[in-house]
Amino acid sequence: MAEDRPTPEQETRRLYEEAEARVAKAAERVVSRDSFGELLAMATENVVALTRMSFDALDLVWSNLRLAGRRDITRLARQLGRTEDKLERVLQEVERLRDEVEREEGPPAPATRAPKADGAEPAAAESATRRPSQRKPAP
């Protein structure tokens, strides 16, 4: 007779499966109605509106703190992109003009300057070949 009675584990499993089946049927009934779709759409709209409002409030906080906000950064990124495009066009034009000047003048003459006896370069020529950040300040 003890074998006919389910164990507590089996009873728990049976109750769980029954509850799961009831919840699944109820959920299918709810989801199959048009009102569920409308409710889901309204909830989504509300979440999007709340998100937008929170971002706008955060931008206002940054603005009041005199810090760069999202809008400021995107505006600066657009300006930087336009500036880079303009600089690229200027560089292309400079290269085109340099090529044109070289074609008109012919190939550059090789340097025929003789080095000094001690092998040192003249100071003026040395400072002219350095980058502006490498030049020594004038005394």
Image (cartoon, grey):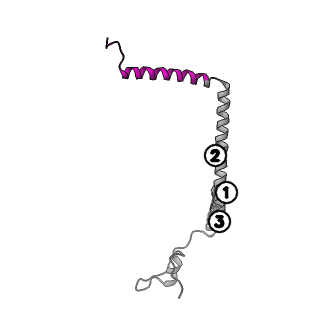
In the rendered image, residue 95, in percent from the top left (x then y), is placed at 61, 64
In the rendered image, residue 28, in percent from the top left (x then y), is placed at 58, 22
Q: Residues within 10 Å of mark 1 (few under 14, many from 20)?
A: some
Q: CA distance from mark 3 to mark 2?
A: 53 Å
Magenta segment includes 123: no
Which residue is pictured at 55% across the width and 20% down the height? 25
Secondary structure predominantly adopted by residues drawn in magenta? helix
In the rendered image, residue 8, in percent from the top left (x then y), is placed at 37, 22
Q: Amino acid at mark 3?
A: Leu
Which residue is pictured at 67% across the width and 25% down the height? 34
Magenta segment includes 11: yes
Q: Which residues are magenta?
A: 1-29
Position of residue 112 relative to residue 4, above or below, is below
Judging from the image, what secondary structure is the residue with disc 1 in? helix
Q: Amino acid at mark 2?
A: Thr
Q: Closer to the observer: label 3 or label 2?
A: 2
Q: Residue furthest top?
A: 1
- Label whose residue precedes the other's in the sequence (3 or 1): 1
Which residue is pictured at 62% across the width and 23% down the height? 32
* Snapshot quadrant of residue 64: bottom right
Q: Please tell me which residue lies in front, 59 or 136.
A: 59
- Asked whether residue 14 appears in the rendered view, the answer is yes
Q: What residue would you read off at disc 3?
A: 97
Q: Amino acid at mark 1?
A: Leu
Q: CA distance from mark 2 to mark 1?
A: 14 Å
The label on residue 60 is 1
Q: Residues within 10 Å of mark 3 (few under 14, many from 20)?
A: few
Position of residue 111 relative to residue 30, above or below, is below
- Label whose residue precedes the other's in the sequence (3 or 2): 2
* Snapshot quadrant of residue 89: bottom right
In the image, is 115 to the left or to the right of 25?
A: left
Q: What residue would you read off at disc 2?
A: 51
